[in-house]
Image: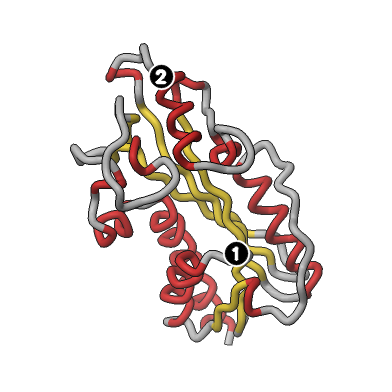
Amino acid sequence: MKEIIIATKNEGKVKEFKQLFDQYGIQVKSLIDLDTDLPEVEETGVTFQENARLKAEQISAMIEQPVLADDSGLVIDTLEGRPGVYSARYGGEPTNDLLNYEKVLTEMEDVPEKKRSARFICVLAMAIPGEKTIFKEGACEGVISTEPKGENGFGYDPIFIPNGYNKTMAELDQSVKNKISHRFNALIQLETWLNEEINAGEKDE
């Protein structure tokens, strides 16, 4: 594998993936870099894994190249896993971060501190033509705050306090967030897989 397509137009995500794949000599491109204007893949899955699979496998089939896709969101125990796969549009359409986390805070208004556990989850799906799709998952455990704080973030960052910290994700420095995030933890799992694949290939030679 000399080149992989990241199924996103988010430059921040692409930068993270480039840092990982560069050390293995694998060139990374995003959907923006493709000459073909691909149709939007509908995320009809009921789990993060299903949505990541849909994006990775459908785009890989279209362009006949390895494709890496991710799906992520916030899972809250007392809300029976919501907002989950609907995290981006929990407050309604069009998507709006403020409406999303305000809805969560309203639903958790009377929930005591001990029952506010939650986690960010990221699932990566690696689809390679002719091979079985690989899945890697990362999580960031924490609790939901009672009010939004901080401006250094997006999504649900202002109301999520990661375990071991007394600040929300939106109050933490980016360098700290990068080392504890759900996407970072998923990338670690992917890197472990890459190392195993390369070592196995060297043994076969």
Decide which of 94, 205 is in the foreground and name it.
94
What amino acid type should be assigned to the residue bearing mark 1?
Thr
Instruction: List x then y, in percent, for residue 77.
Output: 45, 24
- Residue at (53, 64) in percent of width and height: 10
SS under mark 2: loop
- Residue at (44, 33) in percent of width and height: 101
Position above or below: 202 against 144: below
- Residue at (55, 32) in percent of width and height: 91
- What is the distance, in whole Å, between disc 1 and disc 2 at their CAs? 32 Å
Position above or below: 25 against 176: below
* Sequence-first tag of 1 and 2: 1
Decide which of 86, 54 is in the foreground and name it.
86
Position above or below: 146 against 32: above
The residue carrying pointer 1 sits among few (fewer than 14), some (14 to 19) or many (20 or more) residues within 10 Å by Cα, namely: some
Q: Tell me which colouring the rendered structure shows.
A: secondary structure
Task: Determine the image quadrant of residue 95.
Answer: top right
Task: Determine the image quadrant of residue 185.
Answer: bottom left
SS under mark 1: loop
Position above or below: 32 against 174: below
Q: Which mark is residue 8?
A: 1
The residue labelled by disc 2 is 108
Answer whether labels 1 and 2 touch (C-beta < 8 Å).
Answer: no
Task: List the single residue furthest toward the top.
Answer: 110
What amino acid type should be assigned to the residue bearing mark 2?
Met
Q: For this view, does 194 lie left or right of residue 58?
A: left
Locate the C terminus by quadrant.
bottom right
The residue carrying pointer 2 sits among few (fewer than 14), some (14 to 19) or many (20 or more) residues within 10 Å by Cα, namely: some
Q: For this view, does 18 lie left or right of residue 134?
A: left
Instruction: List x then y, in percent, for residue 128.
Output: 69, 69
Instruction: List x then y, in percent, for residue 61.
Output: 80, 67
- Residue at (67, 36) in percent of width and height: 46
